[in-house]
Image (tube, grey):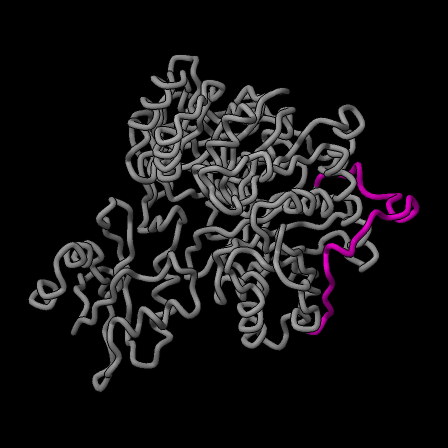
């Protein structure tokens, strides 16, 4: 089924840039609080006054910081087409960098703080950022040690970025050792960037043609490492406005968003709130008790996130007894099958409406969500009504790509200004994401509801959701296969004791191999994020295979059966 609509996005001609919108907000309502940062509690969290953890930033304050950063970028020669990699937690500066990049025509790619050597290296090679903004003194994460390992393995032809170090609030010590942070192109302390003179701030981009790239997100990948999906400025602004309008968020509302700003859901939820006239509460380190205290104090009205995180929010609220009757709306992603239960709890306790949402790095989060009116009603499963007038969808046969008649399930394919504009560092793999006639392949099994609405069923492929992140098993398999004693590796998912998905790897080793499964787990842990490390690595004599027209293929379904059995049972099956 195809949805045909008329588009009226903010594209082509002169538009107000992201920085221009921030300028307007600061002019019209300088004291409007845009972003409130909730820092981790110090001392006894049960007795701390949460107000001491809150840092509210007004429109005027955020504009001042973004302008200072933009002037600094321009002094360094960073401009249109350049990339800025922001390796920060969800701090106010994360927002400031997005607007600063817009002011000079550059684009931002967020780097998750949980990334390790392999993922950070991949971003630097593909995105080739002119500047890397990195965190210092944040929790116990040693960004500097990781960056040194990254630098050691970077190809010689990859340019080294200038490193701008941003210290965590309340970080102990004398500040960053800038010489240690210098990868060869220089380094500086972000705290030294002060208010620029008026002449330095003059001429920053408040208007543009909308064609420049503005933000990029890492995807789950399809070739072993993520693609870097970048979006144009006009399409980004158009999406935030459309999502805010369908959501109905407005002045006086507050979006509670503890998800990382580097990810597409955290980014879109926060920016949608700002474009709707509301504010956003961010939390660098997810702590449900601190979050609940701040939520109740500030009167949070909206929330976007997964049922796994909301389950912890529920536990904290029930423990603290905080009044959350200001909570009106939740956009939920069902990762652990608890969405119905959580929706009923928040409805009965606070009168909250919970709806399922849909989105990805390549088509934006909140591309669609269920609404409370209309014939389709609202549901807590994925899918919903497309937010943009110019967004269209069809349901197609995943093999033939022929459009299917209404009532049949197939691959959801999308087209519109929300769809990825460009893949950073693309070597041709980006074209595989599109059909010959220009539709984006989501890889998701879905069915049509009406011309504007569809229901998400499940992933067509074998992508795993590990600790809330979509992970391509091939990425883990490639790192296992890098070990000199591994011949082939295959990774599947299984539920752990809590019902969450965990990765299980099966490997065939060389004839004289002495490596153990635990040693192979450590091999993966050395380079990949912790959530990608398999819960178990089993060494088998051979892989179960099946014959096909293109050769023999490993039977993932059999490996999933083995993964569900004790290791001794697997050995007997081989």
Which residue is depicted at the point 18% across and 71% down? 540
Of the pair 306 and 435, the residue shown nearer to us: 306
Q: Is residue 158 above or below residue 51?
A: below
Q: Is residue 428 above or below residue 248?
A: below
Quadrant of image for the C terminus: bottom left
Quadrant of image for the N terminus: top left
Q: Is residue 342 above or below residue 17?
A: above
User: Which corner quadrant of the image does residue 349 belong to?
Assistant: top left
Residue 449 position within the rendered picture, expressed as x and y whole percent measured from the top left: 36, 23
Q: Looking at this view, name the residue that lies furthest to the left.
A: 572
Residue 324 position within the rendered picture, expressed as x and y whole percent measured from the top left: 45, 22
Of the pair 69 and 325, the residue shown nearer to us: 325
Q: Looking at this view, name the residue that lies furthest to the right.
A: 199
Is 201 colored magenta in this rendering?
A: yes
Residue 431 position within the rendered picture, expressed as x and y whole percent measured from the top left: 51, 52
Is 95 colored magenta in this rendering?
A: no
User: Which corner quadrant of the image does residue 76 belong to?
Assistant: bottom right
Residue 261 position within the rendered picture, expressed as x and y whole percent measured from the top left: 56, 44
- Report if residue 334 is visible in the image: yes
User: Which corner quadrant of the image does residue 2 belong to?
Assistant: top left
Q: Looking at this view, name the residue that lies furthest to the bottom.
A: 512
In this picture, residue 31 sits left or right of residue 555 = right
Which residue is depicted at the point 91% across and 44% down? 198
Which residue is depicted at the point 67% across and 49% down? 107
Which residue is depicted at the point 10% across and 66% down? 568
Q: Which residues are magenta?
A: 184-210
Total count of labels: 0
Of the pair 536 and 431, the residue shown nearer to us: 536
Of the pair 166 and 456, the residue shown nearer to us: 166
- Report if residue 404 is visible in the image: no
């Amino acid at each position: 089924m195809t949805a045909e609509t008329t588009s009226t996005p903010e594209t082509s001609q002169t538009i107000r840039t992201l920085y221009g919108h921030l300028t307007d907000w600061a002019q019209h309502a300088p004291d409007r609080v845009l972003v409130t940062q909730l820092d981790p509690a110090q001392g006894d969290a049960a007795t701390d006054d949460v107000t001491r953890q809150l840092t509210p930033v007004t429109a005027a304050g955020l504009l001042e910081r973004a302008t200072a950063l933009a002037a600094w970028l321009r002094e360094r020669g960073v401009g249109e087409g350049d990339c800025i990699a922001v390796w920060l937690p969800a701090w106010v500066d994360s927002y400031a960098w997005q607007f600063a990049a817009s002011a000079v025509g550059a684009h931002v790619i967020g780097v998750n703080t949980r990334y390790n050597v392999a993922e950070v290296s991949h971003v630097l090679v593909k995105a080739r950022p002119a500047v890397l903004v990195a965190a210092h003194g944040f929790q116990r994460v040693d960004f500097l040690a990781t960056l040194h390992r990254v630098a050691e393995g970077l190809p010689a032809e990859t340019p080294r970025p200038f490193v701008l170090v941003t210290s965590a609030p309340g970080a102990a010590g004398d500040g960053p050792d800038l010489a240690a942070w210098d990868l060869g192109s220089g380094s500086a302390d972000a705290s030294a960037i002060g208010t620029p003179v008026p002449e330095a701030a003059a001429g920053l981009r408040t208007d543009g043609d909308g064609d420049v790239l503005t933000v990029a997100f890492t995807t789950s990948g399809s070739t072993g490492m993520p693609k870097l999906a970048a979006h144009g400025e006009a399409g980004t602004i158009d999406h935030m406005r459309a999502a805010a309008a369908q959501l109905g968020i407005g002045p006086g509302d507050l979006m509670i968003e503890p998800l990382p700003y580097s990810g597409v859901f955290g980014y879109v939820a926060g920016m949608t709130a700002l474009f709707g006239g509301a504010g956003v509460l961010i939390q660098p380190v997810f702590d449900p008790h601190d979050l609940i205290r701040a939520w109740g104090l500030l009167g949070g009205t909206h929330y976007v996130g997964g049922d796994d995180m909301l389950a912890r929010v529920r536990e904290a609220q029930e423990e603290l007894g905080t009044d959350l009757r200001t909570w009106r709306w939740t956009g939920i992603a069902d990762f652990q099958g608890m969405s119905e239960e959580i929706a009923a709890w928040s409805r009965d306790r606070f009168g909250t409406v919970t709806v399922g949402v849909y989105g990805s790095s390549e088509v934006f989060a909140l591309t669609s969500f269920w609404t409370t009116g209309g014939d389709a009603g609202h549901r807590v499963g994925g899918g919903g009504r497309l937010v943009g007038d110019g967004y269209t969808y069809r349901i197609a046969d995943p093999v033939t790509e022929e459009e299917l008649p209404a009532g049949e399930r197939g691959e959801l394919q999308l087209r519109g200004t929300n769809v990825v504009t460009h893949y950073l560092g693309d070597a041709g793999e980006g074209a595989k994401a599109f059909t010959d006639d220009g539709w984006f392949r989501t890889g998701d099994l879905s069915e049509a509801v009406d011309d504007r609405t569809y229901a998400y069923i499940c992933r067509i492929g074998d992508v795993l959701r590990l600790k809330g992140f979509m992970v391509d098993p091939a990425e883990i398999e490639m790192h296992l296969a890098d070990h000199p004693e591994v011949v082939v590796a295959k990774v599947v998912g299984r539920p752990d004791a809590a019902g969450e998905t965990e990765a299980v790897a099966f490997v065939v080793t060389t004839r004289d191999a002495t490596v153990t499964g635990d040693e192979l787990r450590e091999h993966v842990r050395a380079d990949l994020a912790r959530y990608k490390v398999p819960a178990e690595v089993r060494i088998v004599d051979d892989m179960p295979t099946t014959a096909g027209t293109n050769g023999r293929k490993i039977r993932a379904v059999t490996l999933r059966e083995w993964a569900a059995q004790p290791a001794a049972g697997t050995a007997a099956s081989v």
